[in-house]
Image (cartoon, rainbow, N blue to C red):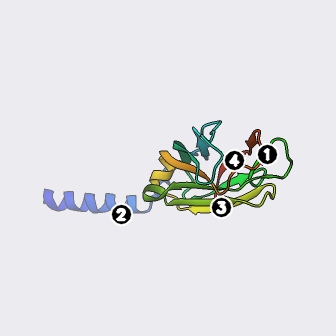
């Protein structure tokens, strides 16, 4: 009889609890933010050709490229003068090709042909996003090769800019 009374009491207790509404669980939304970083660093400030003859080249093999955008980035090279311009004879200069690469790791393969003397000539390359680009590489290569020979004595110069922006 005690077993029956105990079972009845348990059943009545369960029925009475079934009518009580359960409290909603406490919740919080979790989140955070990672600052966007797209940068090209460690590019030598000056690259001087040993001679101003066709085929002469200069390189920088330790350029750092980083962009933490998951969609990747657009890398660009811009020549402000459109060639290596004579310091003495305006708009006279030597054409060149600038090649910026890091193919096996991030797929960067960009060539700028600055042969025309047209100011602010730019070339672009799209680079896919990924963990390696987000962490950055420190061994991208910029090589600039002259496509002609200097005609006049004196200095020749151009400003070559490398840039990266998130896609």
Looking at the image, residue 73 lies above or below residue 64: below
Q: What residue appears at the point 55 percent right and 47 percent down from the top-left corner?
A: 65
Mark 2: give few (<14), some (14-19) or many (20+) Cα within 10 Å: few
In terms of sequence position, does the residue under pointer 1 or pointer 3 come before the other? 1
Q: Position of residue 116 (x, y in %)?
A: 77, 61
| Residue at image mark 1 | 86
Mark 3: give few (<14), some (14-19) or many (20+) Cα within 10 Å: some
| The disc label shown at residue 38, or none | none
In terms of sequence position, does the residue under pointer 2 or pointer 4 come before the other? 2
In terms of sequence position, does the residue under pointer 2 or pointer 3 come before the other? 2
At numbered mark 2, what does the secondary structure look like: helix, strand or loop?
Answer: helix
| The disc label shown at residue 15, or none | 2
Q: Residue furthest right?
A: 90
In terms of sequence position, does the residue under pointer 4 or pointer 3 come before the other? 3
Nearer the viewer's eye, disc 2 or disc 4? 4
In terms of sequence position, does the residue under pointer 4 or pointer 1 come before the other? 1
Nearer the viewer's eye, disc 2 or disc 1? 1
Q: Position of residue 47 (x, y in %)?
A: 62, 39
The residues tagged by marks 4 and 1 sit, at their Cα atoms, a distance apart of: 19 Å
Nearer the viewer's eye, disc 1 or disc 3? 1
| Residue at image mark 3 | 124
Q: Can you say which quadrant of the picture contains the C terminus? A: bottom right
Nearer the viewer's eye, disc 2 or disc 3? 3
């Amino acid at each position: 009889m005690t077993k029956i009374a105990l079972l009845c009491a348990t059943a009545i207790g369960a029925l009475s609890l079934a009518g009580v509404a359960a409290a909603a669980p406490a919740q919080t939304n979790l989140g955070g933010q990672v600052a966007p970083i797209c940068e090209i660093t460690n590019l030598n400030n000056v690259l001087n050709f040993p001679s101003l003859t066709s085929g002469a080249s200069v390189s920088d093999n330790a350029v750092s490229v980083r962009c933490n955008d998951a969609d990747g980035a657009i890398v660009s090279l811009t020549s402000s003068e459109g060639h290596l311009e004579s310091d003495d004879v305006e708009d006279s200069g030597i054409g060149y090709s600038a090649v910026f690469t890091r193919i096996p790791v991030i797929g960067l393969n960009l060539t700028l042909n600055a042969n025309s003397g047209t100011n602010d000539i730019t070339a672009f390359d799209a680079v896919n996003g990924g963990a390696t680009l987000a962490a950055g590489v420190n061994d991208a290569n910029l090589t600039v090769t002259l496509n002609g020979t200097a005609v006049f004595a004196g200095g020749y110069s151009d400003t070559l800019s490398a840039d990266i922006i998130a896609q």
